[in-house]
Image: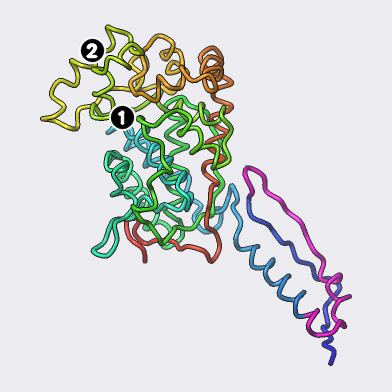
Amino acid sequence: MHIVARVSPSLSLSLYYLVLSSHLFIFSVPLTSIAKFATMPSPLFTTLFFFFFFLVNFSNARLTLDFYKDTCPQFSKIIQDTVTTKQIASPTTAAATIRLFLHDCLLPNGCDASILLSSTAFNSAERDADINLSLPGDAFDLVVRAKTALELACPNTVSCADILSAATRDLLTMLGGPYFPVFLGRRDGRISRAADVAGHLPKPSMPMSQIVQIFTQRGFSVEEFVALSGAHTVGFSHCSEFISDIYNTSSSHEYNPRFAQGLQSACADYKKNPTLSVFNDIMTPNKFDNVYFQNLPKGLGVLKSDHGLYNDPITRPFVENFAKDQNRFFQVFAKAMQKLSLLGVQTGRKGEIRRRCDQVN
């Protein structure tokens, strides 16, 4: 038996493939070409039919820069207004959101806003993993505010993953950091397990080789990893993350002596008040610049991993280069952030648009 399909020669399909890294590949396949296969034996034609059907469904699974142009034209303005208001009210919001973004995207399931999901009676979520317990509440609050405003303007349209990605970029530029295009169209993940976090996020106590490996396994170069570490030019670290190092004789020599004394004084009561923290960059703590890298050779890094960046022969050349060339730092950082924002994204029928960012539908 043969199957004959009648296809109008004037018809054509545009099939769009998913964003890969920072490139968008577009190609088209005329249906008139498919018509040539219409008289083939049914098994072969069926195979071809499902192949093209699969590609057609990809046309609804693409990331674009203007994804919400028709469905939520107020998207950009709502994000900008929300982040501006929140950052003015709480200046630590930007650094907190950059960290939240990293902790979401760097995990194996990628940028799917799974870090925002709350634990349930049956599951301990990513945000309750030990390393994530110190994630600042301002970042979560920002996403909630933006989601509430967007649900009022365009219900069930904008994903929490897109909110987090766009808000991170806007906050970065508010602090003087580099701009990078954010592709949109992500869906929110449905799975978030604390048990999946271990070994996939860097800890200050890890050897530098292990931290580098976490990033290179996700496709980043060593230079890109060092640039992403430059996010420490803003934000703060809790005393509990470095207190043992400033008293440890084997590592205390890495700290500037007066700086170490200052840290000891600032963290004297950290056992009574575990929320005590210090700025990662004591020179320009609220400005995104390359001063963080300039601090490291002077022994002004706060965390053990900060000192590791300068002391490790593999990462040190990039630290020195970024310290003297802020434009290069910004260029590499922007590229790495865009790459990070595209890791493991779910699109189309994968994932969902959550009605609330802290729970699945």
Q: Choose between 223 and 216: the one closer to the eye.
A: 216
The image shows residue 323 at horizontal and vertical percentages of: 51, 14
Under mark 1, the amino acid is Pro
The image shows residue 313 at horizontal and vertical percentages of: 53, 19
221 vs 229, left or right, is right
Residue at the far front: name it.
250
Q: CA distance from mark 1 to mark 2?
A: 23 Å
Residue bearing the label numbered 2: 262
Q: Choose between 356 and 125: the one closer to the eye.
A: 125
Q: Residue at x 84, y 84 (%)?
A: 41
User: Label 1: how many residues lie within 10 Å, few (<14), some (14-19) or many (20+)?
Assistant: some
Residue bearing the label numbered 1: 91
Q: In the displayed structure, would residue 246 be above or below residue 189?
A: above
Residue 286 visible in the picture: yes
Residues in magenta, as a range:
20-45
Q: Residue at x 55, y 20 (%)?
A: 318
Q: Choose between 347 and 105: the one closer to the eye.
A: 105
Instruction: Give SS at disc 1.
Output: loop
Q: In the displayed structure, would residue 160 be above or below residue 220?
A: below
300 vs 266, left or right, is right
